[in-house]
Structures are given as C-alpha cells and as structure tokens.
C-alpha cells in the first residue's frame, strides 16, 4: 500500500466512500469529514457513500447530506434524491425480501444462542435485506474467534457474511457493494465503471470493502485498515496517515489542493 500523498490524479469527478470508521470517528460524524463532503459537492464532484448501514439511514442521508446518491445494506439498494423526488432501487422484489427475512430470523436465534456477548444491531429495525450482528458498537468488543463463529453460522445456512468494523452483516444473494456500484453508475449516469476508472476513487476501512479495494484503480483506505490488513486478499492501493474521518479529510484536502 502506497502513501496517499503519492496519488496525483486531479481529474476526480466521483468519490465513493464507506461511512463507519471511514467518515466517522468513535461512532460520530466529525465536522471535518462532513465539511469535506460539502467541499466536494460545491466543486461539482459527486459523492456516493457505499455502506452496510440500513435502508432507513439511507433515506435520511440521500435527502439531507451533500451526496448524489447512496448505496446501502452492502449493495442491496441505492437511493437518490433529486428535485424533491426519492428514487429507490432494490435488488429483490417484496416477496423475496419477505422469504429471506424468515431465513434470517432462524439465523438470528442461533447466533444469539451460540455466541455470548453479541447482539442484534440497534439499527436492525431499519433494515430490509440483511441481518446485522453487533460485535463492538454497542456491546463490549468480542474476540476474533467469536466474530468468526458468527460468520460461520451465516455460511452454514447458505448466507453471505461480511465483517465491517462494527458488525457482521449477513444476507442471501450474491450481490455486494461493487455490483450495486456498477448498477448505480449505469442507471444514474449512463457510465461504465470499468472505462471511467480514472475519474473515480473509493475510500474504505474494513473487510467488507474488499471487492472495492480490488476493483478500483484508485482505491484508498484510512489508516485503521491496519487492524484488518492481514485478512485482506485484495488490499487498497493507497493508505492515509490518519484514521477515520481525519484520514478522509487529509485525503480530500490532498486531492483538492
């Protein structure tokens, strides 16, 4: 991983970014990273958060943040808000969502029974597609062995499981952040992600960002990726000097200066 200061591309028109521990620090959104979003917006650079957070959060972020859209629940959906109209795109229809929820409820009961100390994420009531298991956001941090056990339970049921900096997210289907990113660009900007790489960056911090790290030519991680770097087969190209929102801020300042 190269230092972010060695990145010299000044033609960036799109910034795709994770939220938790990439824009945030200690669970809060600091003023410096939020100010960076507005700097990008005011210069006409499109910001699209790509997050494991739920549909309910995406509704608010699409409406109130200076963003051109948001991809949520690890690629299950995207929302845009333009001209006072909210557009919502989902990977599945309502019946499939309902069927998958029944299967996820079975997994939920097993996880809570077999992994002491974990909890269902407090934002679960806002979710449509996945089950989020909290291992350090609102509960004392679990050992890695416990996190791995949560992942394994999902997989034994045929579900996909991804580890973020705070949750294990599990769902049924082969979608991920990258697949929805491609759909979003095609539908909203009539652009192909592969051919437009030089105009885009991605910023993340954890294993569930790995598809993006591997695909984007201009992929970045804030410094706290160091905690997970040995778990990654596909690593980011660049790394910031600082963690979380401070790392995001120094990256954007470098690109814009």
Image (tube, grey):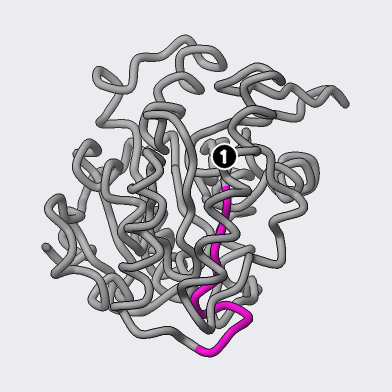
Residue 127 percent coordinates (x, y): 69, 46
At mark 1, the secondary structure is helix
For disc 1, the neighbor class at 10 Å (few under 14, some 14 to 19, many from 20) is: some
Left or right, 209 with respect to 22, comes to: left
Question: Going by the picture, which residue comes out furthest to the right?
Answer: 84
Q: Nearer the viewer, residue 61 or 228?
A: 228
Give the vertical position of 142 relative to 159 (above or below). Answer: below
Q: How many dots with numbers?
A: 1
Please state, as top left, top right, bottom left or bottom right, where the C terminus lies in the image.
bottom left
Where on the picture, by quarter, is residue 150?
bottom left
The residue depicted at 34 percent of the width and 68 percent of the height is 149
| Residue 166: image location, x then y, percent | 49, 70
Q: Main secondary structure of the magenta part?
A: loop
Q: In this view, does 2 lie to the left or right of 108?
A: left
- Please give the name of the residue rendered at 36% of the width and 77% of the height, measured from the top-left corner: 146
Instruction: Quadrant for residue 252, please give it.
Output: bottom left
Identify the residue shown where x is 46% and y is 19%.
Answer: 183
Q: Does the magenta stretch include residue 149?
A: no
In this view, the residue in front, 129 or 237, is 129
Give the quarter of the figure containing the N terminus: bottom left
> What's the magenta region?
131-140
Residue 139, percent across and down? 59, 84
Q: Residue 139 lies in magenta, yes or no?
A: yes
- Residue 248 in picture, x, y percent from top left: 43, 65
Q: In this view, does 175 lie above or below 29?
A: above
- Which residue is the site of mark 1? 103
Q: Does residue 179 lie above or below 110 as drawn?
A: above
Residue located 63% across and 81% down the image? 138
Q: Which residue lies furthest to the bottom in this view?
A: 140
């Amino acid at each position: 991983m190269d230092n972010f200061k060695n990145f010299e591309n000044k033609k960036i028109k799109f910034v795709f970014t994770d939220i938790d521990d990439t824009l945030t620090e200690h669970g809060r959104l600091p003023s410096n990273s939020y100010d960076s979003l507005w700097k990008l917006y005011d210069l006409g650079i499109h910001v699209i958060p790509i997050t494991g957070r739920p549909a309910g959060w995406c509704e608010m972020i699409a409406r109130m943040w200076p963003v051109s859209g948001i991809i949520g629940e690890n690629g299950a959906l995207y929302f845009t808000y333009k001209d006072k109209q909210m557009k919502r795109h989902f990977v599945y229809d309502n019946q499939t969502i309902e069927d998958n929820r029944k299967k996820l409820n079975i997994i939920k009961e097993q996880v809570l029974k077999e992994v002491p100390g974990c909890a269902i994420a407090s934002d679960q009531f806002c979710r449509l597609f996945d089950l989020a298991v909290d291992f350090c956001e609102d509960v004392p941090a679990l050992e890695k062995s416990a996190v791995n056990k949560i992942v394994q339970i999902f997989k034994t049921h045929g579900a996909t499981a991804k580890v973020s900096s705070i949750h294990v997210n599990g769902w049924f289907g082969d979608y991920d952040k990258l697949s929805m990113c491609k759909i979003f660009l095609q539908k909203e900007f009539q652009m192909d992600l592969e051919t437009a790489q030089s105009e885009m960056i991605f910023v993340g911090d954890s294993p569930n960002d790995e598809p993006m790290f591997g695909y984007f030519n201009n992929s970045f991680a804030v410094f706290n990726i160091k905690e997970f770097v040995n778990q990654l087969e596909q690593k980011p190209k660049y790394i910031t000097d600082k963690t979380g929102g401070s790392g995001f801020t120094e990256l954007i300042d470098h690109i814009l200066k």
